[in-house]
Amino acid sequence: MASRVMGIATNGLLVIILLLTTNDGSSALDLRRVAKDKCQTGSHIARTLSLNDNLVCSLACSTDSSCKGYCFSASNSICRISYTEMGTALFAAVSETGFDMFWSGYLGGWTQFGSKAYKLFRYGYDHGGARTYCWKHYARLALPMNEDENSYLYGTLAGGARTWIMADDYNQEGNWKNTDTGVSLPQNTAWFCRGQPDNAGKDGEDCAELAHDLRCWNDIPCGTGRWFTCEVPLDQCAHGVVDIRCGYTTL
Ligand SMILES: [Ca+2]
Ligand SMILES: [Ca+2]
């Protein structure tokens, strides 16, 4: 009986995954399939442990400096530690038949700081393009939420570089909010440069950039080309979360 219920649930889950992929139009399904193959065939697995707790499996990876990712199967109490990169997503969780797959670690240039991991992309995208690019990497445009995160982002830049921040006042002048969630950000506006935001110019300025040279934020037109940093909250993909973008379901 238990396996029948699991089978039905799995089929339902696969339908959801296919719909997400269709709406997304990205390579989400490809990533999943590749990673699933690696988990199931063990082609990139260096160690297989007998563990019945995903957190213990995660700990085994985090305490092994060579670990690039792991697969965990609750039903088989198997923890597979990989010493090679397993995908392009920094951290993703997908429940499929057999394995719940987790990629963790610092893949492809992602760097952990605090509870998030970051990657700087040196492409001159407009604000919307940068957001979309981050989504396609199963991440989101960076938005510092405390002084430490804000300082960290300045530290990743050099030479007066400027990068997008996920904040805009596009819908209501002066009401700065998280562009993805629409949540207002009154606490973050303290980080604007002196005299900013000034909504300068005929068409105004509705998107926020982080200026390395000034160590503060500025508002500029959203269509400007800027580098950008994507971030992933490392706790967003708790065990059992279906959407690998973990809460970012609307593209
Ligand atoms: Ca504005
Ligand atoms: Ca400005």
Image: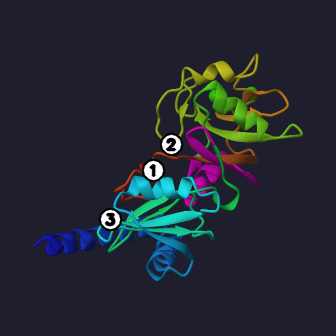
Where is mark 1, residue-wise? 248
**10 Å neighbourhood of mark 3: few (<14), some, or many (≥20)?**
some
Distance between mark 1 and mark 3 Cα atoms: 26 Å
132 or 68: nearer the viewer: 68
The secondary element bearing badge 3 is classed as loop
What residue range appears in magenta?
113-140
236 or 55: nearer the viewer: 55
| Residue shown at the point (50%, 79%) measured from the top left | 42
Residue 125 drawn in magenta: yes
* Residue 219, visible in the rendered structure: no
- Which x, y percent locates residue 243? 40, 58
Going by the picture, which residue comes out furthest to the right? Answer: 159
The secondary element bearing badge 1 is classed as loop
Identify the image quadrant of residue 15. bottom left
Where is mark 3, residue-wise? 74
- Which x, y percent locates residue 205? 69, 32
**10 Å neighbourhood of mark 1: few (<14), some, or many (≥20)?**
some
213 or 198: nearer the viewer: 213
| Residue shown at the point (81%, 34%) measured from the top left | 212
Residue type, numbered disc 1: Tyr
